[in-house]
Image: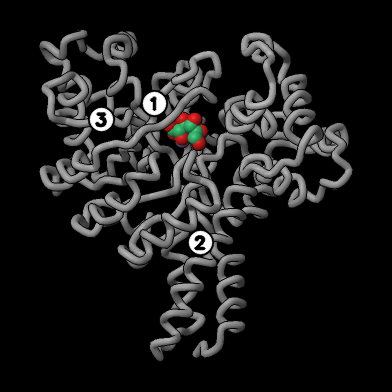
């Protein structure tokens, strides 16, 4: 039985160090996807979070920057964000956590030395090293059948050869850009037209079903703007209600709307130019009420939506809230959101995903998040001990595993 705070802190730390994480949303790929899996220091430094921060200080022409070779872009980011000033932002700190945990000398500030480390590494070795350092059991990829390069890899059968990398079927073009994406379906032999006439709905269902099965996708995901709703009789509404939801039901997989992104607010910044807005949580109520046989994995991008999303999850067993997404993945906000969720949902949520785009991101995103989630848990346990409640190492272990892996697995099975 755990009785004192020091013992409690030690046990939580041990459990956090041992837990095997299932990372429910990343942009990583297995080595079988070749150049689609980003890794290495130059990719770390040219992450779009850091590019946005680079342009806080630089007046360089955007086009000029993006036309440079990646190493030169990385040199500029290193100089501007790490040498010219102290790297205090979360993304800056993240790059340093990565270097440090890989055993490199952060004090030297020598980018060439960091590049040298990578010369002797193979991607296979690096995946093993990073998964080990970050405590990862498996990651869920973001898999896009509208991307010609990715499509061919899946068709060749190479897509799910590494069991540590699970698939999630991502269908943004279908819901956000049907005017163009229907042509991809046509090209792949599906009988659809631009106006959802004839067999189109049935054929879109066939397309989704074929891809879920080909990828063995754990869920079907889409990122959506803040004004997403299903109240108009639009193409998006019809595809969601008449194709996406029925196929998810039939194959018993969750639908994962990720809501709140305003894409390309500053187009010239590329990925770094996306922003966010507050959404209307009523669309989640609508989905959970009207489709009780569906399961919904939901994350929202605006801080302002977080309390109401947690309360909505109290109303629906078919809703699982996950992650502190993108602009929310900052220590202060992770602490606040995790506290709100734990106080309203107990342990019935998935506190974090990494959204890693570069393999090594797993190291910093999980180390930083685990520390804060652990502190929130410790504060809650301390309050419990004050009531006279008894905790054991086994109960702590079970709770930590729920947060970092079994809640997701059980939700998929539910
Ligand atoms: O839509 C998404 O899945 C977003 O997470 C990404 O598109 C975004 O660019 C990102 O990497 C955020 O972390
Ligand atoms: Zn993402």
Secondary structure, mark 3, is: loop
Secondary structure, mark 1, is: strand
Q: Nearer the viewer, residue 140 or 327?
A: 327
Q: Which is in the foreground here, disc 2 or disc 1?
A: 1
Q: What residue is shown with label 1?
A: 262
Disc number placed over residue 225 in the picture, else none: none
Left or right? Give the position of 117 relative to 345.
right
Mark 2 or mark 3: whose residue is earlier in sequence: 3
> Which residue is located at x 44 percent, y 23 percent?
155
Q: Nearer the viewer, residue 51 or 136?
A: 51
* Residue 105 position in % (x across, y down): 85, 47
Left or right? Give the position of 175 relative to 365.
left
Secondary structure, mark 2, is: helix
The residues bearing labels 2 and 3 have C-alpha atoms spaced at a distance of: 30 Å
Q: What residue is shown with label 2?
A: 373
The residues bearing labels 2 and 1 have C-alpha atoms spaced at a distance of: 28 Å
Q: Is mark 3 within 8 Å of ligand 1?
A: no
The residues bearing labels 3 and 1 have C-alpha atoms spaced at a distance of: 11 Å
Q: Residues within 10 Å of mark 2 (few under 14, many from 20)?
A: many
Left or right? Give the position of 84 relative to 239.
right
| Colour option used | one colour
Quadrant assignment, res 60: top right
Q: Is 313 located above or below residue 40 in the figure?
A: below
Q: What residue is shown with label 3?
A: 228
């Amino acid at each position: 039985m755990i009785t004192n705070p020091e013992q409690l802190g030690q046990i939580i730390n041990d459990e956090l160090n041992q837990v095997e994480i299932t990372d429910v949303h990343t942009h990583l790929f297995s080595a079988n996807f070749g150049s689609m899996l980003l890794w290495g220091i130059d990719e770390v430094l040219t992450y779009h979070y850091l590019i946005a921060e680079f342009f806080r200080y630089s007046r360089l022409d955007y086009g000029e920057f993006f036309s440079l070779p990646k190493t030169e872009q990385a040199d500029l980011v290193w100089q501007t964000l790490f040498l010219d000033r102290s790297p205090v932002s979360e993304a800056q700190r993240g790059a340093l956590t990565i270097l440090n945990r890989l055993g490199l000398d952060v004090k030297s500030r020598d980018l060439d030395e960091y590049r040298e480390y990578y010369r002797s590494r193979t991607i296979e070795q690096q995946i093993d090293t990073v998964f080990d350092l970050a405590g990862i059991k498996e990651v869920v990829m973001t898999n896009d059948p509208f991307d010609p390069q990715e499509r061919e890899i899946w068709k060749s059968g190479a897509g799910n050869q590494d069991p540590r990398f699970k698939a999630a079927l991502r269908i943004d073009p279908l819901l956000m850009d049907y005017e163009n994406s229907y042509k991809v379906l046509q090209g792949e032999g599906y009988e659809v037209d631009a106006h959802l006439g004839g067999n189109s709905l049935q054929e879109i269902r066939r397309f989704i079903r074929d891809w879920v099965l080909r990828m063995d996708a754990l869920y079907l995901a889409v990122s959506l703007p803040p004004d997403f709703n299903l109240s108009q009789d639009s193409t998006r509404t019809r595809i969601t209600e008449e194709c996406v939801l029925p196929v998810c039901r039939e194959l018993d997989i969750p639908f994962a709307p990720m809501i709140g992104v305003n894409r390309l607010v500053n187009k010239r910044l590329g990925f770094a130019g996306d922003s966010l807005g507050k959404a209307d949580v009523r669309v989640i109520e609508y989905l959970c009420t009207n489709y009780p046989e569906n399961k919904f994995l939901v994350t929202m991008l605006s801080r302002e939506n977080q309390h109401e999303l947690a309360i909505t999850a109290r109303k629906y067993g078919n809703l699982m809230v996950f992650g502190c997404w993108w602009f929310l993945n900052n220590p202060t906000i992770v602490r606040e959101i995790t506290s709100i969720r734990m106080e309203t949902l107990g342990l019935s949520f998935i506190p974090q995903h990494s959204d890693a785009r570069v393999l090594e991101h797993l190291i910093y995103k999980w180390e930083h998040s685990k520390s804060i989630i652990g502190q929130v848990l410790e504060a809650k346990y301390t309050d419990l001990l004050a009531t006279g409640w008894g905790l054991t190492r086994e109960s702590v272990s079970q709770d930590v595993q729920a947060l970092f892996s079994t809640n997701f697995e059980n939700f998929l099975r539910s």
